[in-house]
Structures are given as C-alpha cells and as structure tokens.
Image (tube, grey):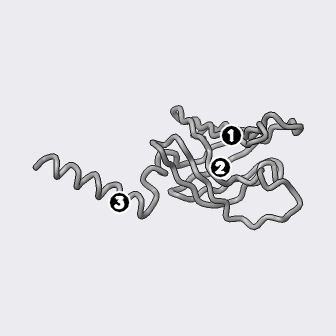
Amino acid sequence: MKLLTFYASAMIFLISCSKNNDCSSNSISGRYTGTFKRYNTSVDKTAQVSIDFNKAIWTGSSEFPTYPALNTGTFSLAHNNETISFKNKAGWTADFDWTFILDGNFILHKNNDSLVFTKSYGNGAVDVYKLAKEK
C-alpha cells in the first residue's frame, strides 16, 4: 500500500510539473551574467551576456546585437537537468547568421551558482555560454 501511495504521489508531481513547466525550471531561477563564445570558427570574439530565468521564461542581452542573438523566450530542463532547451520568441531580421540565435537544445552543466551550456554543430563549431548567478 505504501508503494502504491508513493507512485501515485510521484505521478501527481510529474504531471503537475509537466503541465506548468516550472518545477525543474526553478532550480536555475535568477539573473546570470558571463560570456558567450563560438569556438572553432573564424569569428574570434567573446561577448558579455546576461540571462534572466524566471519560471519557464528567459530574457537576455548581449554586448553585441546578434552575437549571440538574445531577446526573450521560453526554456525547459530535461534529462535530470542535463539538457536545457530554448525557444526564442523574438522576430529577427535576415542580415546575420541565425545560428547565433539562442534556440534549441544545449548540454547543461550546473555547478552551485554557475551554468555552462554548450551546443555543437556539424561543422565543428561549438557555442559555449559560461554564466554565474548574480547575488
């Protein structure tokens, strides 16, 4: 009977988290600042960035308008918080490389109040965001 109660409680928790999508997202809530860099390309620059995570919504800015292209959208954590998925809700012009838009799936490494998320491309390029939570 105790096992049945445990499973029922676990299912209710999982269903409620999947419906409002903010249970695991709360584990990284807050404002993070740091850097963005794309490795293994001819572009050799590092951008100062900031991203705010609030429930399932993110907003961000970069010192460069489209490197990376940040604005606002939604995010979710998956695979035991080892993956973060972004949906960028901004409307973008066609005058830059859209692979710089923060969108899609990234591998997430969380260490205390630090986040590092990466995304690899088929051509060997890798995007790396290194962020620390502001106190």
Identify which residue is drawn at 43% across, 63% down.
20
Question: Which label sits in the foreground, 1 or 2?
Answer: 1
Which residue position holds label 1? 129
Q: Nearer the viewer, residue 111 or 17?
A: 17
Q: Residues within 10 Å of mark 3 (few under 14, many from 20)?
A: few
Nearer-N-terminus badge (3/1): 3
- Asked whether disc 2 touches disc 3, contact meaning CB atoms under 8 Å apart, the reply is no
x then y, percent, for residue 128: 70, 38
Q: Report the side of 3 relative to 15 (left or right).
A: left
Nearer to the camera, 104 or 57: 104
Left or right: 74 with respect to 69? left
Identity, as a three-letter code, of the amino acid under mark 2: Ile
The residue lying at 67 percent from left, 36 percent from top is: 130
Q: Nearer the viewer, mark 3 or mark 1?
A: 3
Which one is closest to the eye, mark 2 or mark 3? Answer: 3
Name which of mark 2 and mark 3 comes first in the sequence: 3
Q: Amino acid at mark 3?
A: Ile
Label disc, if present, on residue 51 of the rendered structure: 2
Tag 1 and tag 2, C-beta contact below 8 Å: yes
Label 1: element kind: strand
Real-space Cα separation, disc 2 to disc 3, in angstroms: 28 Å
Secondary structure found at label 3: helix
Q: CA distance from mark 1 to mark 2?
A: 10 Å
Quickly name the residue at label 3. Answer: 15
